[in-house]
Amino acid sequence: MVATTKRTVRIKTTQHVLPDLPPVENFPMRKWAIEIFVLDADGKEITATLFDKVVYHLHPTFANPNRTFTEPPFKIEEQGWGGFALNISLFLLEKGGERKVVHDLNFIKEEYQVDHVIQVPLNKPLLRTELAKSGHVEEPPTKRKNESTTSTTEPKPKKGKASVTPTVKGSVDIQQLAFSLTKLKEDDLVTIVQMITDNRTPEMDVVNNVEDGEFVIDLFSLPEGLLKSLWEYITKNTE
């Protein structure tokens, strides 16, 4: 399993009333803007160079609701009269994966900020360079060659280990799920780790061993809903 590290992403919102525009349903029209930053080890905002693009998924009442920005601070500006739950897709450098966050766009304050913690893979050279600008970056685990073999084949990256019971939980075949995990590419494995981390509960038996580059899970300890989501993702992303 690919080793990851955490970084905090800050989403900053500013908004103000547009007095020259007529209200809608007795709500004043407003201009709002959102920018995205990363926090360093001291909690200071720095340029979000971890991402090569950001996509804002606006309310469907907006024209062209999916807006893509490729330059930090990935600023979007719009006008509207009502708040909504804004889905934001953050795409890491070097195809390091997509991180989805939900931002509460509201007009309670003229300026506010919300922080989100994301997992970032450590197996991308350029991404590691940008990570170093915001804090410590762990060294990747050293791969040891098997001294008893004469094979010159490049050692394969470690896959996620799972302690599984060969049975079915709900509608998911745990044994088949574990086997399918070994068929995923590294980028997809990072997504699987993110899905499990985002939905982790105390009942789940999960160990994230960053130093050894391993993510160990007991699949049978995962709730049925999460197992279904994992299976659906794997089905779409395996050949």
Image (cartoon, helix red, strand yellow):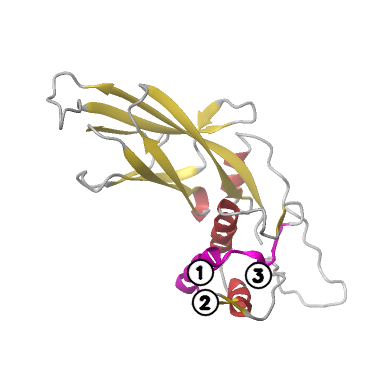
User: Judging from the image, what secondary structure is the residue with disc 2 in?
Assistant: loop
Measuring 50% from the left and 48% from the top, which residue is drawn there? 93
Q: Nearer the viewer, residue 127 or 214?
A: 214
Measuring 64% from the left and 26% from the top, which residue is drawn there? 42
Q: Nearer the viewer, residue 3 or 27?
A: 27
Task: Quickly name the residue at label 3.
Answer: 220
User: Judging from the image, what secondary structure is the residue with disc 1 in?
Assistant: helix
Residue 67 in percent (x, y) is at: 30, 45
Q: Which residues are magenta?
A: 213-239
Residue 64 in percent (x, y) is at: 22, 47
Residue 105 in percent (x, y) is at: 35, 35
Residue 117 in percent (x, y) is at: 56, 41
User: Judging from the image, what secondary structure is the residue with disc 3 in?
Assistant: helix
In the rendered view, does 12 fall on the left or right side of 124?
Answer: left
Q: Are the residues flagged by discs 3 and 1 in contact, CB closer than 8 Å?
A: no
- Type of amino acid under label 1: Lys
Measuring 56% from the left and 61% from the top, which residue is drawn there? 192
Task: Quickly name the residue at label 1.
Answer: 228
The first of marks 2 and 3 along the sequence is 2
In the rendered view, does 16 fall on the left or right side of 158?
Answer: left
Using the image, determine if residue 232 lies above or below residue 4.
below
- Type of amino acid under label 3: Phe
Quarter of the rendering containing residue 159: bottom right
189 magenta-colored:
no
Measuring 41% from the left and 39% from the top, which residue is drawn there? 103
Q: Quadrant of the N terminus?
A: bottom right
Using the image, determine if residue 38 lies above or below residue 109.
below
Looking at the magenta stretch, what is its main secondary structure?
helix
Please indicate, yes or no, whether residue 8 appears anywhere in the rendered image: yes
Task: Quickly name the residue at label 2.
Answer: 171
CA gap, disc 3 to disc 1? Answer: 12 Å
